[in-house]
Image (tube, grey):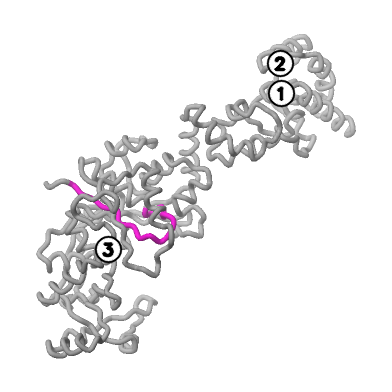
Amino acid sequence: MSKVRTRFAPSPTGRMHVGNLRTALYAYLIAKHEGGDFILRIEDTDQERQVEGAVEIIYRTLQKTGLIHDEGPDKDGGVGPYVQSERQAQGIYLEYAKKLIEKGEAYYCFCDKERLESLKQTVAGKEIVIYDKHCLHLSKEEIEEKLAAGVPYVIRQNNPTTGTTTFHDDIYGDITVDNAELDDMILIKSDGYPTYNFANVVDDHLMGITHVVRGNEYLSSSPKYNRLYEAFGWEVPEYVHCPLITNEEHQKLSKRCGHSSYEDLIDQGFLTEAVVNFVALLGWSPTDNQEIFSLEELVKAFDYHHMSKSPAVFDYTKLKWMNGEYIKAMDFDTFYEKAEPYIKKVITKDYDLKKIAAMVKTRIEIFPDIADHIDFFEEVPEYDSEMYVHKKMKTTKESSLLVLQEVLPLLEAQEDYSNDALYAAISAFVKEKGYKNGYVLWPIRTAVSGKQMTPGGATEIMEVLGKEESVARIRKAIEKLSQEK
């Protein structure tokens, strides 16, 4: 078998959709698993849909995700240009379209907009033009006369209307369609640019692409691709169509959901490594139960034959869990570097931010979660005194008030406010009084945090707050409980 060559051929139309990122990832993994080449090609033939800065987004996303291309617009491997508008300017697509005309596999079409409108039919609730091959029957003289007169034209593929066409997909198997269903699709548009479908076939052949990876929405177009390959006498590549990605309601993942693009997810506090790992599992399953993969591990494990035909559900909850696992596994310095901006959005006081970060590291799934975990350090929120009641700890509002009143002098006299010293002092108090640890620590933690759940225990929190603030909060809690007696 020849060297495996795959390509990622995005259109520069904005942020990279999760589906496009998966296509890029699978194409990369197929190539690298076999020691092959991964090519980047920019498909900008649809000039109207281009978004300024989108090409930079493509480069930046591939670089950040580690999907480094071997060839592309910035890395000439000898089969460039790697930008379709530049290839169009060289006349590549028109040249190959004319070769098909010579073979009778394509033809000039001069039909104007009004005539095409008259051919519209409603199929499956949609209005579409089913072309009637009108211009296929023009004589050579008529064609030359119209070309000389500058009559606008497109070039159409000449598909048969009888018989069937079969193509093979490595995921979906053999698929056969009636040729009557194949329209004479446009190859070259009236502006001289090729259509996406035609440019893909020509470029994939000229660039030696062996495996074409794309979404299964292109399954229906594949018979027309095959007929083009056969018309040229070219070898048909391996087709690998990826399953649809849906949301939790099993609807197509759309931009409206708020997490449909790679950059959406990064903006929401997800880690690139977690996103890549998660996207790899949207339609592919490893042979074992492993779920956490580095990119290098994915290259070794990835076998596209284990891809699914069924739609893949974008489980946002699972992505958050996976991201949390990556955060837990981070070394502390890297974590703190990423967490610090989120902490500083909440904490303005002169606290040890690294101690706060250490408390939340194993408790968050995405970085924006930090705020809800640490906001009490800045200021005790308004809270219901019912929080002092804990059946397991056997605490009541009355017992909590008594404990806080008893422990306050100890905390006022305590000079060393390190976690260990505070815990030792309170433990001695607990032993002396004959209390259980939770019976004392629960009301203290509630008093200094005002929250049901905190990232650290009472003494850890007090170490960060320091003596003055800790004592002030306990006095305020005593006042709050006393007023309710």
Q: Which residue is mark 1?
A: 462
Foreground pick, 385 / 35: 35
Residue 207 in percent (x, y) is at 19, 55
Quadrant (top left/top right/bottom left/bottom right) for the C terminus: top right
Q: Is residue 52 visible?
A: yes
Q: Amino acid at mark 3?
A: Glu
Relative to 249, does residue 163 appear above or below in the rendering?
Answer: below
- In this rendering, would 366 be left or right of 55? right
> Mark 3 against mark 1, which lies toward the viewer?
3
Point out the stretch of residues depicted in magenta. 4-20
Relative to 219, does residue 181 appear above or below in the rendering?
Answer: below
Dot 3 alpha-carbon crowd within 10 angstroms: few under 14, some 14 to 19, many 20 or more: some
Mark positioned earlier in the residue sequence (3 or 2): 3
Secondary element at tag 1 = helix
Q: Residue at x 79, y 23 (%)?
A: 468
Q: Which residue is mark 2?
A: 422
Residue 86 numbered mark, or none: 3
Q: Is residue 439 visible?
A: no
Q: Residue at x 29, y 65 (%)?
A: 85
